[in-house]
Amino acid sequence: MRDFWLSCGHHLTDRDAGGGLLVTDALLKAYLARPELRPPPEACTAEQGLHAALLADPRRPVGAGEIAAMTDAEARENWGLMIAFRDHLLRHRTLEAAYLDLVGRNIGGTPPLFLDQLVHLILRNILDGCDDPFVLRAAELFFRPQRLTAHGGALLAADEETIAGAGAAPLSPLVSMLGIPPGAQIDVLSDENADTYWGRSDRFDMALDLTAGRRGSAAVGTVVERWVKHMLSRDAVVEPLKEIRDVPLTWYVGLDAEGTRIGDALWNGEPLDETAQRRVVGLFRLTLGDRAPAATPVRGEPVYLFLAMTPGKVLRVKPQNLLTGLPARHAAAFA
């Protein structure tokens, strides 16, 4: 079995009997190694002392006074956010349970970076043993913003952070077309180069073709199925669609803020102008297994999913929308 996404820290975790990821000391220490928390040489004694103490005992209680004693305001902010996040993880047995709790009640108070890291880890757990690079690349959409562009009749998604990198000279027409700084080599994932994904999965330097009817769109549907199964203990079948015409939107979920706005407009009977239509990246029909309660409005009815990019052609998927928006959240596996 080939490994992937080593940077997420999956190797620092353990699993419980239900398949959830356990919070380990090794994982907590990895957060302490982040540059935002590693004290610079000029850091005050209070900051250096707390960092050293937590490296020795990453579950050690931290009082508000220890953070307030730090002389640097940015350090106080970073440590306050980190300790609050650490304490939240420690209140839950698994990372999945911690994420579900954040999604359910306090996601707005958690830095997006921490949320993306949790999704990265959880998806690495969900996709353990997956041998399809298209599915793995599609899963990157769930925790890394993408820049979209149309080229040669295809809709291509490239990692936004990778695009923002730097280098020497453009190496391909795709690099120039996406506005990628010289040297940031991007290849479009294909059957011919798919085997190279394993060695470069942590570089996030392969673009995905999300054109309707092609393999990338189907791979996104597979990731949604796996996410719903793991997080909500519900079977789901997801079908990519090329268009939606004359269907009752009994239930819909936007997979991002733009997708939600488009779903809301259609729900209210508003026509989509050409500009809004061009922002649609993907349409999907999700059908849950037959264990939905009889009183559920969508029992036996499909749920339509909308994926869309911003006017600036950036795609920011919110996987939590599936957990809060589907009529299956009562069955959360790790709650």
Image: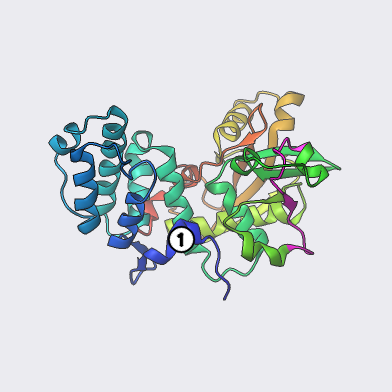
Picture residue at 55% right of the left edge, 64% below the top: 4
Q: Nearer the viewer, residue 62 or 15?
A: 62
Q: Quadrant of the N terminus?
A: bottom right
- Image-based side of 21 in relation to 169, left or right: left
Q: How is the image coloured?
A: rainbow
Q: Is residue 185 magenta?
A: yes
Picture residue at 31% right of the left edge, 41% below the top: 41
The residue sitting at the right extreme is 152
Q: Position of residue 33 (x, y in %)?
A: 36, 51
Range of magenta residues: 177-193
Q: Nearer the viewer, residue 269 or 138?
A: 138
- Image-based side of 227 in relation to 277, left or right: left
Q: Describe the element under mark 1 as helix, strand or loop.
A: helix
Q: Position of residue 204 (x, y in %)?
A: 61, 51
- Image-based side of 273 in relation to 95, left or right: right
Q: Is residue 269 magenta?
A: no
Picture residue at 30% right of the left edge, 44% below the top: 85
On the image, which quarter does residue 156 sit in? top right
How many discs mark residues in the rendered view? 1
Q: Position of residue 282 (x, y in %)?
A: 68, 43
For label 1, the residue is: 230
**Residue 245 seen by the camera:** no
Picture residue at 55% right of the left edge, 71% below the top: 129
Under mark 1, the amino acid is His
